Image (cartoon, rainbow, N blue to C red):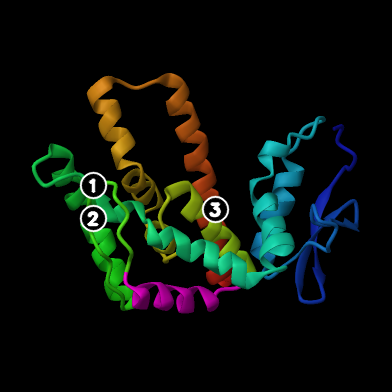
Amino acid sequence: MKRFYRAAGVGEAEGGWRVLLDGRPVKSVGGRPQIVPCRALAAALAAEWADQGEEIAPARFVLRDLADYAIDVVGADRAAAIRALVAYAETDTLCYRAGPDEPLWHRQVAVWEPILATAEARHGVRFERICGIIHRPQPEATLLRLGEELVTHDDFTLAALASLAGLAASLVVALAAIVPDADIAGLWSAAHLEEAWQAELWGRDPDAMARQARRAALFAAAAQMARMLLNPHES
């Protein structure tokens, strides 16, 4: 698609802020007004439009896609969005480990256990650690408590968490990524520890590395959006 606007700006709207293209407000993919909670996010969305060239590249609209997901999907059914997020905790990557007699187990414990223990303390929950790939249910009280935590977040933060959890296969990592001063690169590496381990053993595939880099950038963008929402005056 050819670029159809000259300038991208930001304007106030009832209930928040919005992107203006040559003075005209942007709508979500679903056709709803694209109004976001804070000016920092609106400015970041406008920057995505401003940074487009003569040909619009949809893949570069990372934050726009997250905002539209919040408006069109999460806003339409918050309960379903929260259930989908809690499901990541039921099979959280950080809980499934190799056997204690395997070298990988030692690295998993060293990297994953501090993140998991911090989550338990922060949210007042307990996670089952599992050796092997056979599913074991997490405590019902843990899932209920995490659901209560998720309810406190707005639609846009839930959208960011959905992206983070999907990319990490871990709700624990997703929630850790929205904490102020979170080590985003470290959390990404932790979530993909097993892939790194395999690469060390068998070598690194350039195509796989390129895919991982793109996914890591998406993870960082989702964390950035969440931090804008949770600390709007610091953005």
Residue visible at 11% across and 47% down in the picture: 100
Label 1, label 3: how far apart the Cα atoms are: 26 Å
Give the dominant element type of the magenta stretch: helix, strand or loop.
helix
| Residue visible at 46% across and 76% down in the picture | 149
Q: Which residue is mark 3?
A: 163
| Residue 67 is at least partly visible in this image | yes
Looking at the image, is mark 1 or mark 3 earlier in the sequence? 1
Q: Secondary structure at mark 1?
A: loop
Of 78 and 140, nearer the camera is 140
Asked whether the beta carbons under mark 2 and mark 1 sit within 8 Å of each other, the answer is: yes
Q: Hey, what amino acid is under mark 1?
A: Gly
Q: Residues within 10 Å of mark 1 (few under 14, many from 20)?
A: few
Disc 2: which residue:
130
Residue 37: quadrant of the picture: bottom right
Q: Amino acid at mark 2?
A: Ile
Q: Dot 3 lies on which element?
A: helix
Mark 3 is surrounded, within 10 Å at the Cα level, by few (under 14), some (14 to 19) or many (20 or more) other residues, namely: many
| Residue type, numbered disc 3 | Ser
Residue 178, numbered label: none
Q: Is residue 229 left or right of residue 35?
A: left
**Residue receiving disc 1:** 132
Closer to viewer: mark 1 or mark 3: 1
Q: Which residues are magenta?
A: 139-154
Any part of residue 231 in sight: no
Instruction: Relative to 201, say whether 153 is above or below.
Output: below
Image label count:
3
Image point (74%, 34%), residue name: 57
